[in-house]
Image: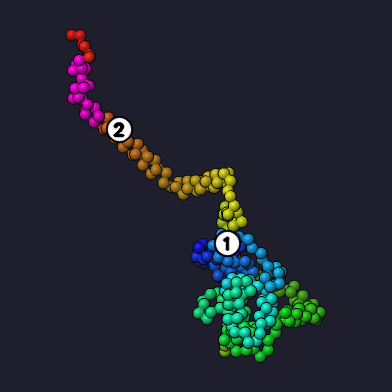
Amino acid sequence: MGLCKCPKRRVTNQFCYEHRVNVCEYCIVTNHPKCVVQSYLRWLQDSDYNPICVLCSKDLIIEDCVRLTCYHVFHWACLDQYARKMPATTAPAGYTCPSCKVGIFPPTNLVSQVADVLREKLAGVNWARIGLGLPLLSEEVEPNKANHIKNHVSNTMPLDNMVDGHRDSHDAVVHVEEPVITYSRTDSSGQQSRRVYKAVEEVTPVGFDHDENKYKRKSFLEWFKRWLNSTSNNRRYHTGSLPSRYCKLAIGLVVAICMIIIFVRLGRLSVADDPALDPMSNPYIKVNE
């Protein structure tokens, strides 16, 4: 178990292998969509990882990815092609993760942001809509074809529109906003509900130990430097109570001196009438009269 560093400060057992930090499901969806994420206990057992798609052996970052409820990440086009190769009579339970053989479709009673994003992604293809219990789409475009059409439309844009847009941009006021990731979800009624996940920028305090150095062995100089910083901070915090500290120290010193004097006098009184300590009663000591 660990504490996520996002403003929500949620307790989680998921760990990002690439950034070496505990992540909650909110951060997985917004800030780590293509990172290798598994449980922290598994990372302690084996910290080696390979950020590639198992289906095509290419880097995850080069294409659009989808994360299953088992937290394994694949290219969406590769996963779609992998599922389309299965027979049409395949039951929903037959669509499993290529890595761990866990079901692709999330349970209906699972409340999870990762599961919500996965459902929204699967709702765009007919083979997945059957497993989700949704009606089939009348027209379906494969992910590869959709990307090809998008690129073709952007390349064939009229030059006049581009020039006009360039002219208008000189007089326009540009407002820079924080990046917002929007996901659309299709229900059985055909309506689309949009869910917005706002990206969270983590603010790192001064003197904070970076995650890459978190699990490295610290030298004695680094430890001594951190100890000096902690003592200086404590002194700054206790500067207002300096007179009271000196007053308590003086009172304690006076009490200690008084106790020493009392015990010394009590010791002398206890041996004052002891005949063994009386030189006149000792036969080996001769006192001339």
Give the percent coordinates (x, y) of residue 23.
56, 65
Instruction: Tell me: residue 234, above or below residue 154.
Output: above
Give the percent coordinates (x, y) of residue 34.
64, 69
Q: Which residues are magenta?
A: 265-283
Question: Which image quarter: residue 67?
Answer: bottom right
Instruction: Tell me: residue 263, above or below residue 9.
Output: above
Question: Which image quarter: residue 123?
Answer: bottom right
Q: Residue at point 69% right, 77% down?
A: 77
Say which element carries label 2: helix
Instruction: Tell me: residue 106, above or below residue 200.
Output: below
Magenta-drawn stretch contains 20: no
Locate residue 270 relative to residue 184 in the image: left or right: left
**Mark sitting earlier along the chain (2/1):** 1
Amino acid tagged 1? Trp
Q: Which residue lies under the disc numbered 1?
A: 43
Amino acid tagged 2? Ile
Seen from the viewer's position, the closer of residues 102 and 251 is 102
Q: Residue at point 62% right, 84% down?
A: 90
Residue 255 — which label? none
Q: How is colour applied across the structure in the image?
A: rainbow
Res. 225 visible in picture: no
Magenta-drawn stretch contains 274: yes
Locate residue 140 relative to residue 227 in the image: left or right: right
Q: Residue at point 67% right, 78% down?
A: 82
Quarter of the image with the C terminus in it: top left
Question: Which image quarter: residue 273?
Answer: top left
- Front position among marks 2 and 1: 1
Q: Which residue lies under the disc numbered 2?
A: 260
